[in-house]
Amino acid sequence: MIKFEPNIEKTTLKICSRCIYDERVNGISFDQNGVCNYCKQIDSLKLQYSTGESKGKNDLDAIVEEIKKSGKGKKYDCVVGVSGGTDSSYMLYLTKKWGLRPLAVHYDNTWNSAIATENIRKVLTALDIDLYTHVTDNKEADDIFKAFFKAGVAEIEASTDLALAETMYRAAAKYRVKYIFEGHSFVTEGITPVGRNYFDGKYIKSIHKKYGTMPIKTYPLMTFSRFLYWTIFKRIKKIRPFWYLDYNKEEARAFLEKEYDWKYYGGHHLENRMTAFYHSFYMPRKFNTDFRNNTLSARVRLGKLTREEAWKEYNTEPHLEDDLLEYFKKRLALTDKEFEDIMNAPTKSWYEFPTYKKRFERLRPLFLALAKANLVPMSFYLKYCFPAKLNK
């Protein structure tokens, strides 16, 4: 587990003077005042989207009106990805508040926590929202997870993120919906550096081809051609309302608990058991990487924590369910020795395997145009379309 000095004044690491990103974060740089490039990226996005300002709200209001016009005569006018977490649950409430007719979409990798499943049910029932779910065969899902684990790369959860995106596109196309809402907030979560958080369809396919044992039949793989089909030909837009609004995650959570008997699941990204293993154990133990610095840094930028408080919390062990490791080993049919051997083996990185990364970089002008048109998230353009600065 990561161990370093919990006193921010005593550590020898170079740390951003505005947040708690330190010199170990991939691609980080500091200006003459000690401010990191990721804080500046957040500042730039806030200016671009007028986040939390009247202009940002007005821009979002205009998008909502556009969605209503586009959805006339259709059963649904937007798609909302749901996980049972705070952001997506609150997003469902907002869409109904705005007078929209959302279709909730869920990708089930068969590792959902009971709390997340109940949260989805409670919110959808209370708001009278239909649910579209794609469930991958559990043996197939586990085979993909196990392939990534055996490969020794960081992105063992990548298949879930990409599959949700593909599932939302499929649902939108089926019901002729042109807008997808995503509950991401760069203000409350930051944008994770690409160094240990890369994924695309070619990467997933190449890892599974080398380390998997069964064919992919039910997993919704998004290839490069399908990505272009959804964005350029179907013109399905992705909107992130929290990029425009003054979004307060703590207030949203309190609202959900009061109105819908929604339950908190113990921490950011812990609503799914594979995701919990990834954040709470796998990344800290094998890669010396703790993604809590994203949320903690965001809270420092928002003035909700001091740098000292955030750094101290960052130096505590992540919350780990009592039976999570045994559950992981049992699901993936790993002996204790196999598990330890893989955990102790040398790490590998995404750039050692075939990916679409160079293609994204070559087509940077295209993806900038798509991002400006809300056809791909701006965070995709910023993370995927520039050469990665890798701490090898």
Image: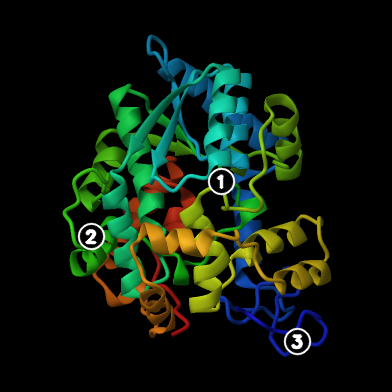
Q: Is residue 167 above or below residue 97?
A: below
Residue 40, given in percent of the width and then of the height, sits at 64, 65
Q: Which residue is mark 3?
A: 11
Disc 2: CA contacts within 10 A as few (<14), some (14-19) or many (>=20) = some
Disc ID at residue 205: 2
x 75%, y 68%: residue = 313
Disc 1: CA contacts within 10 A as few (<14), some (14-19) or many (>=20) = some
Dot placed on the residue nearer the N-terminal end, 1 or 3: 3
Dot placed on the residue nearer the N-terminal end, 2 or 3: 3
Farthest residue to the top: give it: 73
Q: Which residue is mark 1?
A: 184
Classify mark 3: helix, strand or loop: loop
Whether residue 361 is visible = no
x 32%, y 21%: residue = 175
In this rendered view, identify the residue nearer to me: 225 or 200. Answer: 200
The picture quadrant where one finds residue 344 is bottom left
Classify mark 1: helix, strand or loop: loop
Q: Mark 2 and mark 1 in contact (Cβ < 8 Å)?
A: no
Dot placed on the residue nearer the N-terminal end, 1 or 2: 1
Residue type of the residue flagged with mark 3: Thr
Is 171 displayed left or right of 255 in the figure? left
Q: Is residue 285 above or below residue 228?
A: below
Residue 172, given in percent of the width and then of the height, sits at 35, 29
Q: Mark 3 and mark 2 in contact (Cβ < 8 Å)?
A: no
